[in-house]
Image (tube, helix red, strand yellow):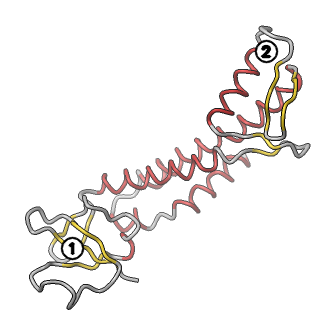
Amino acid sequence: MTRYARIDDADNRCAEFIDFAPQGRFHPSTRWLAVPETLTPWANHDYVANDDAIEPPSLDYLRDQLKTRLAAIRFAEETAGVTLPDGSQVRTDRESQAQVNSAYTSLREGFVTTADFKGANGWVAITLEEITPIAQAVSQHVQPCFTAERRVGEQQIDAAKTLEALVAIELDAAFAAELEAVKAG
């Protein structure tokens, strides 16, 4: 389905978007342009009409849009949780990451000898020996997510020099491939 943008004559920006053909439905003086399919996920009110084409205000603007989406992909993976070898589920949302780190640090530094810890499967009293593999699993889950995001951002988004190269990046697939590569070592 083609998306159309109404162009504001005052500043040549996209003022409105519709998902149906505007011909015959609006005043003839209203200027509508088809949004290129490759820009449909990205086009917003900051996009401009250049002659008869919709474009981002700059390549850096589009880069920032891709990086914002890439960060959301990373965040979703980062906070999806991790399964330990024994089948236990460990949450990896930001609060849970902080709690695992706090319990691990408190036990490692000898501030306490056991810590009550609430995991996805309920309450447990844990020792340093028990929290260490959990903290390692969380770290080994979270850090690769950031590394994969950085690699895609630097090696693909920053390296792209044209609009066509930027919109050709399939962020979900690129992130998944980098994450797999990072985890493989």
Amino acid found under the numbered disc labelled 2: Arg
* In the rendered image, the vertical position of residue 65 relative to residue 92, given as above or below: below
Which SS class for mark 1?
Answer: strand
What residue is pinned by disc 1? Answer: 6
* In the rendered image, the vertical position of residue 20 relative to residue 68, given as above or below: below
What residue is pinned by disc 2? Answer: 108
Residue drawn at x 87%, y 28% as measured from the top left: 124
Which SS class for mark 2?
Answer: helix
At label 2, counting other C-alpha atoms closer than 10 Å, the crowd grade (few under 14, some 14-19, many 20 or more) is some
Q: Name the spot of residue 101 as percent of width and height, x first.
A: 70, 25
Residue drawn at x 40%, y 62% as measured from the top left: 166
Who is closer to the viewer here, 148 or 123?
Answer: 123
Q: Quadrant of residue 35?
A: bottom left
Amino acid found under the numbered disc labelled 1: Arg
Q: Quadrant of residue 46?
A: bottom left
In the image, which disc is placed on residue 127?
Answer: none
Q: Name the spot of residue 99 as percent of width and height, x first.
A: 70, 27
On screen, residue 85 versus residue 144, left or right, reads right
* In the rendered image, the vertical position of residue 20 relative to residue 139, given as above or below: below
